Image: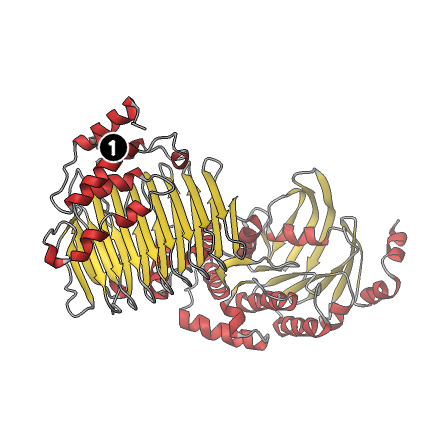
């Protein structure tokens, strides 16, 4: 589903190399987790995948379902099936959550040459998905993420994911700022979306999210590289011993 | 002090083309006398520093002649009483009848006294009060020379909004229009103004809102491509009265909208808001002066401007709290969204407070489109231009929210969505 080949990325303004040759292949329907200490380049990877400005790709290629995406605009990547759940979902005062969701859905449909959803169909769909995520109608009426608690923001991200039905979901530290109950709710939302045709890349610091979203593979990232890959047991090893053992091993 | 030779010459030239209409003669003569002392506005006046008044002062020239484009904005779906002006002249035959409504309507040009004896005292009186402490010569000029306008005395709750529709057919028009609106105790009216009056317009509205009355005003300056427009709203509010005025401007070479509000009674509410979007040859000036005299009054000023391709925005807003106007709640925000490096916004927020138990705040910002918000929208599949439009509308939302009737604000929002 997602194939990253020797990806090297610099910060545009500082000429500082953040990603130093990432290789990663995610099969359709599988869940991969990336763990790593602060500053290892995890969030940068998620931003580069989704096409944020400010990063310069100096080498490598990224393919989504066999198509190269690095030349695409963020909205084209989204319409092609890539979804980034933000670590810090952005507040947009003045734009109603419903307007936002409908504009996003219909923009993607239009891009793919599908018919746009009618207001009534959209409303029905949103209400159904929102209910599953315990998002009340008041939250849907408010401006995007404005005045939302940390948990509400993350649930709103998952709601968008559920509506947009992407093929490849990148979750950037979705557990940050969440209490145990909120994390479980979010994880349930993600698990409900697990599907043969949908892959996940879960970026996290901690094992605890992976207790709820069970990964097929775990990768450890440090200093812009993936230094070790393995099964779920790798996450447990990090939880018990921290990153220092693994880092020492590599050095 | 007599005017300098230059200012005197400029004034004489300006008024040489104007004729004093034969009604409200006493008030007009007084106004003429005053303008001869005051002179026309000049760049040296504190409140004309950022807007060059010469296009208002000069003799009307053929260079300024523009014919209106089709106005895509109409308020028909709201269900209004329509009052039609054509080239600045009231067209009674084309207008809806207001029979059965609790109001009197005459034209200011109608001099027969039995029709509206209140008008004789009213005409020019609020404008004159608004000349202190700052001269407003264009309004004074208007009081002397205004050729037409409506005098409305409202005595009850008007069942539907009144929509003054300005139509334009003339290729050469320079109009002075003057409306007088008096809401008697316990009455209410929503007034919408739309369309374009003339190539150059000087419009004055005098408004008195009596105790327990409310006046809602929406003015759409959406059909003013290349026009030169000066408007003044002079409002006086008594106890428990409400004024909410919103102006939308999407075109106009030069627009200066002045709001002068006196909160005379206690517990009055004045909300002034405006949203403008302009590009290129677009100079937009909001000049506001709100005076608190009564206690427990609330005033809000919410002014938003979206500017691009060299457009120029000005905001000069003042809250004056007089001694004794305790428990005043004053708020003022002026913001610009600059879509490129060529556009400019200048703001001069002022507070002058002589009472000690008040809450007054003001803020002014200029900024570009929020890149984080833009990326967030695009990452969800919203194309860049659509995302920018969404953020522009979001920026204007606070001003539009000041419109009481959501049917009207939704109509304006739809218009903006379409025209972006």
Image quarter where the N terminus of chain B lies is top left
Across and down, in percent, residue A13 comes to: 66, 38
Across and down, in percent, residue B63 comes to: 23, 31
Subunit that carries the residue with mark 1: B
Across and down, in percent, residue B182 comes to: 25, 59
Q: Residue at x 81, y 65 (%)?
A: A235
Mark 1, Cα crowd under 10 Å, few <14 / some 14-19 / many 20+, is some
Q: Residue at x 32, y 65 (%)?
A: B213
The residue where tag 1 is placed is B36
- Disc count in the image? 1
Against B52, is A188 above or below? below
* Residue closer to the observer: B397 or B356: B356
Query: Relative to B6, is B325 on the left or the right?
Result: right
Q: Is residue A195 visible?
A: no
Circle 1 SS class: helix
Q: Residue at x 71, y 55 (%)?
A: A24
Query: Relative to B359, is A61 on the left or the right?
Result: right
Q: Is residue B33 visible?
A: yes
Across and down, in percent, residue B203 comes to: 26, 45
Snapshot quadrant of residue B198: top left
- In this picture the colour scheme is secondary structure
């Amino acid at each position: 589903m997602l194939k990253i080949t020797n990806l090297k990325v610099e910060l545009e303004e500082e000429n500082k190399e953040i990603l130093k040759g990432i290789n990663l292949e995610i099969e359709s329907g599988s869940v991969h987790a990336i763990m790593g200490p602060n500053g290892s380049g995890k969030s940068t990877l998620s931003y580069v995948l989704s096409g944020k400005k400010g990063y310069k790709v100096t080498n490598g290629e990224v393919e989504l379902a066999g198509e190269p995406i690095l030349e695409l605009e963020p909205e084209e990547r989204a319409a092609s099936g890539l979804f980034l759940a933000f670590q810090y979902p952005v507040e947009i005062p003045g734009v109603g959550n419903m307007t936002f969701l409908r504009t996003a859905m219909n923009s993607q449909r239009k891009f793919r040459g599908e018919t746009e959803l009618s207001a009534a169909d959209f409303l029905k769909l949103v209400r159904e998905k929102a209910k599953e995520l315990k998002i009340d109608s008041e939250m849907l009426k408010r401006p995007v993420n404005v005045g939302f608690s940390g948990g509400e923001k993350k649930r709103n991200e998952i709601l968008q994911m559920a509506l947009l039905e992407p093929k490849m979901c990148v979750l950037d530290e979705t557990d940050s700022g969440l209490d145990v109950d909120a994390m479980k709710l979010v994880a349930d939302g993600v698990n409900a979306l697990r599907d043969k045709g949908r892959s996940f890349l879960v970026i996290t610091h901690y094992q605890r999210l992976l207790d709820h979203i069970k990964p097929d593979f775990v990768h450890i990232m440090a200093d812009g590289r993936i230094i070790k890959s393995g099964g779920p047991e790798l996450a447990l090893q990090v939880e018990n011993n921290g990153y220092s053992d693994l880092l020492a091993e590599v050095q | 002090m007599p005017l300098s030779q230059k200012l005197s010459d400029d004034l004489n030239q300006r008024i040489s083309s104007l004729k004093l209409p034969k009604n409200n003669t006493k008030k007009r003569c007084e106004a003429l006398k005053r303008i001869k002392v005051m002179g026309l506005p000049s760049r040296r006046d504190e409140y004309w520093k950022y807007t060059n008044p010469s296009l208002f002062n000069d003799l009307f020239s053929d260079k300024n002649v523009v014919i209106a484009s089709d106005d895509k904005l109409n308020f028909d779906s709201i269900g209004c009483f329509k009052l039609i002006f054509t080239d600045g002249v009231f067209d009674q035959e084309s207008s809806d009848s207001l029979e059965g409504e609790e109001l009197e309507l005459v034209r200011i040009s109608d001099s027969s006294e039995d029709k509206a004896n209140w008008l004789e005292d009213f005409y020019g009186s609020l404008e004159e009060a608004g000349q202190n402490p700052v001269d407003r010569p264009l309004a004074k000029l208007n009081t002397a020379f205004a050729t037409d306008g409506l005098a409305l005395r409202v005595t009850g709750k008007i069942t539907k909004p009144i929509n003054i529709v300005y139509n334009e057919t003339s290729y050469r028009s320079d109009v002075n229009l003057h409306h007088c609106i008096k809401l008697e105790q316990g009455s209410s009216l929503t007034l919408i103004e739309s369309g374009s009056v003339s190539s150059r317009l000087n419009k004055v509205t005098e408004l008195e809102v009596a105790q327990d009355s409310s006046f809602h005003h929406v003015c759409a300056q959406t059909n003013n491509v290349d026009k030169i427009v000066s408007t003044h709203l002079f409002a006086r509010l008594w106890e428990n009265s409400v004024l909410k005025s919103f102006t939308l401007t999407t075109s106009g070479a030069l627009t200066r909208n002045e709001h002068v509000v006196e909160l005379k009674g206690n517990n009055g509410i004045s909300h002034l808001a405006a949203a403008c979007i302009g590009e290129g040859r677009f100079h937009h000036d909001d000049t506001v002066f709100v005076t608190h005299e009564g206690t427990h009054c609330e005033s809000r000023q919410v002014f938003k401007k979206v500017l691009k391709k060299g457009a120029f925005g000005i905001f000069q807003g003042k809250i004056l709290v007089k001694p004794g106007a305790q428990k005043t709640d004053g708020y003022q925000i002026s913001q610009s969204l600059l879509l490129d490096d060529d556009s400019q916004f200048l703001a001069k927020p002022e507070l002058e407070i002589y009472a000690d138990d008040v809450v007054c705040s003001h803020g002014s910002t200029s900024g570009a489109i929020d890149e984080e918000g833009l990326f967030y929208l695009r990452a969800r599949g919203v194309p860049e231009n659509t995302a920018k439009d969404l953020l522009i509308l979001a920026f204007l939302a606070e001003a539009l929210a000041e419109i009481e009737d959501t049917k009207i604000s939704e109509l304006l929002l739809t218009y903006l969505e379409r025209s972006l």
